[in-house]
Amino acid sequence: MKRVDAVAAMRDLFEAHGQGLVTQPPQALTLLPDNRGDYITYSGVLPEDGVLGVKVSPYVVTPSGGKVTATTMLMSLETGQPLLFCDSLALTTERTAATTALAVDLLARADSANLAIIGSGPVALAHLRHVLPLRSWKRVRIHSRNILAKKETLEARFGNLQPFPEITDDCSLAVADSDVVLLCTSSGTPVLSTEHIRPGMLVTSISTNVARAHEIPPEALTRMNVYCDDRSTTPLIAGEMVMASEHEWSRDDIRGDLGELACGKALAPSPDRASFFRSMGLGIEDVKMALEIHRVSSHAS
């Protein structure tokens, strides 16, 4: 069965985004009554593809704790009828990792050799899978909290990957001399310090929906080349950007978003600084992935 090339899909999407050919409304957060949780609505319109779509992701508070789910619906612009209705778990994981991979391909130095991944869950492993073919990596290191307890399971999942990832319980060791660092955690507070970040390094971040969540210190932005997935929406909700903008940093300091990078319109990274790419996840990414799944499913049937 034909498989979706998620990175190619995101490249096509962001080239269209950079040309102004897609519509990306802001995310909408709706609080549920009586402190029962909330839900986020991600929507987008791809006119050239003749589709629109929406992903709804509730966070529901239950007696046993909070539960997050997500569902995506794809609809035809011609008929208004639904084309696809699916659980968004795998879709979100793949589009998140593919978006980061596209940013790495566009921002990382061509001679990047050392890769570090902070996080060891499904999203982190998807990042590894999508980023591994992009450069001639000589070393890959993976770190997360309590990672040694997962070592055997992770190494079994790595299979015959080359270079075979090194597992370390020391974050400083994981990022030492790394050219690219992928932050793939659910942490609401920094997992890297300013001492970890050095000139020439590319750091990517996805973070979580926790209020003001940030994986690097906000003050680090003033000393980095800053990029994001969408300059009109990301700085309004990304925790480190919101916090940094309350002090010395401005959203005007963003050197480019992913659409501008894909179209060659963004400012290139200054080599005397580290670079930072922040992804918050966009509705157009969900819509594009749903469309590719629909195309593969239709072809298979």
Image (cartoon, rainbow, N blue to C red):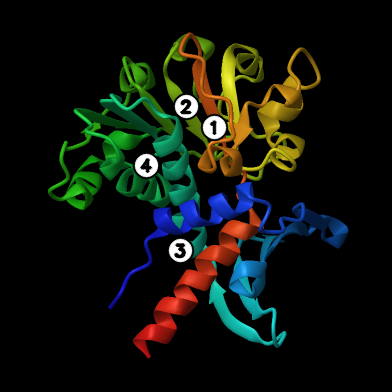
Q: CA distance from mark 3 to mark 4?
A: 16 Å
Q: Residue at x 60, y 15 (%)?
A: 220
Cα separation, mark 4 vs mark 1, equals 20 Å
Badge 4: few (under 14), some or many (20 or more) residues near its Cα, within 10 Å?
many
The 10 Å Cα crowd at callout 3, few under 14, some 14 to 19, many 20 or more, is: few
- Please give the name of the residue rendered at 47% of the width and 14% of the height, measured from the top-left corner: 197
- Could you tell me the amino acid type at mark 2? Val
Q: Residues within 10 Å of mark 2 (few under 14, many from 20)?
A: many
SS at mark 3 in the image: helix
Find disc 2 in the rendering and name its residue: 203
Residue at far right of view = 33
Q: Label 2 vs label 1: CA separation?
A: 6 Å
- Name the N-terminal-most of marks 3 and 4: 3
Q: Residue at x 42, y 15 (%)?
A: 200
Chain-order first, disc 2 or disc 1? 2
Mark carried by residue 90:
3
Q: Which residue is mark 1?
A: 277
Give the mark toward the camera: 2 or 3: 2
Q: Amino acid at mark 1?
A: Phe
Q: Nearer the viewer, mark 4 or mark 1?
A: 1
Say the numbered circle drawn on residue 120. Answer: 4
